[in-house]
Image: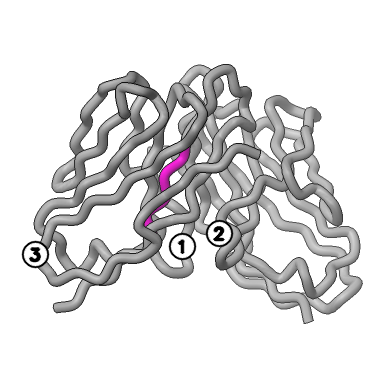
Amino acid sequence: DVKVTQSSRYLVKRTGEKVFLECVQDMDHENMFWYRQDPGLGLRLIYFSYDVKMKEKGDIPEGYSVSREKKERFSLILESASTNQTSMYLCASSRTVSGNTIYFGEGSWLTVV
Amino acid sequence: GQQLNQSPQSMFIQEGEDVSMNCTSSSIFNTWLWYKQDPGEGPVLLIALYKAGELTSNGRLTAQFGITRKDSFLNISASIPSDVGIYFCAGQLLGGGADGLTFGKGTHLIIQP
């Protein structure tokens, strides 16, 4: 089974703090993604990566950055957290040749106060 | 980005009833995916469809890839309490890259005993 693991399930951070969300997948997938999920807005793509050290902006990259130093690990960074970044963050991965079937992690609930 | 129209938004049904939901778009997709999300968890892949007209079952779940490639449906037969959750469709646009998945807003299934 594909396993995508997000290191933190629940975080509470203060406005202005730097926040790291870590994600690891164990299936040697080329592609990794970070989404945020908000009520009424559905899933929105923040960033994705199709290879080590490669990254591409998604639909809502503002206020976020990412890092992919190893194939299995994709980190989402909030340089200076703001209250409007309170959300559920979902990491996902896929293999390019599999029709882009993506597999999600369990999610990280971030509250910025 | 592209929009997927998923309906209904929510369903209130009795245990044992069959359920049907669908996703439509004005665009052509080459992959359709169906996910279920339990409260506080990440989406879990239920069924993946890769060919127009394909009909695939996973236990009590059946999904079809529409022959026009612009729609897909998911049926659940004889619903049980653990079917409660939010069901999402996702489509990979024809010619889309790794970031080319578009998600529906979800169907919230509620089962009354």
Q: Amino acid at mark 2?
A: Gly
Q: Residue furthest bottom?
A: A113
What colour scheme governs how the chains and residues are painted in the rendered image of this protein?
one colour
Q: Nearer the viewer, residue B75 or A63?
A: B75
Name which residue lies at 84% across and 71% down: A82
Q: Quadrant of the N terminus of chain A?
A: top left
Name which residue lies at 70% across and 75% down: A111
Name which residue lies at 53% across and 20% down: B94
Separation of disc 3 and disc 2 at Cα?
31 Å
Using the rendered image, report if marks 2 and 1 lie on a common chain: no
Q: Nearer the viewer, residue A89 or B112?
A: B112
Q: Amino acid at mark 1?
A: Glu
Label 2 environment density (alpha carbons within 10 Å; few <14, some 14–19, many ≥20): many
Q: Is B106 situated left or right of B54 in this image?
A: right
- Residue A107 image label: 2
Instruction: Give the residue at mark 3.
Output: B16
Q: Quadrant of residue B53?
A: top left
Q: Quadrant of the C terminus of chain A?
A: bottom right
Using the rendered image, report if marks 1 and 3 lie on a common chain: yes
Q: What percent of the width, then of the height, locates residue B40?
A: 48, 68
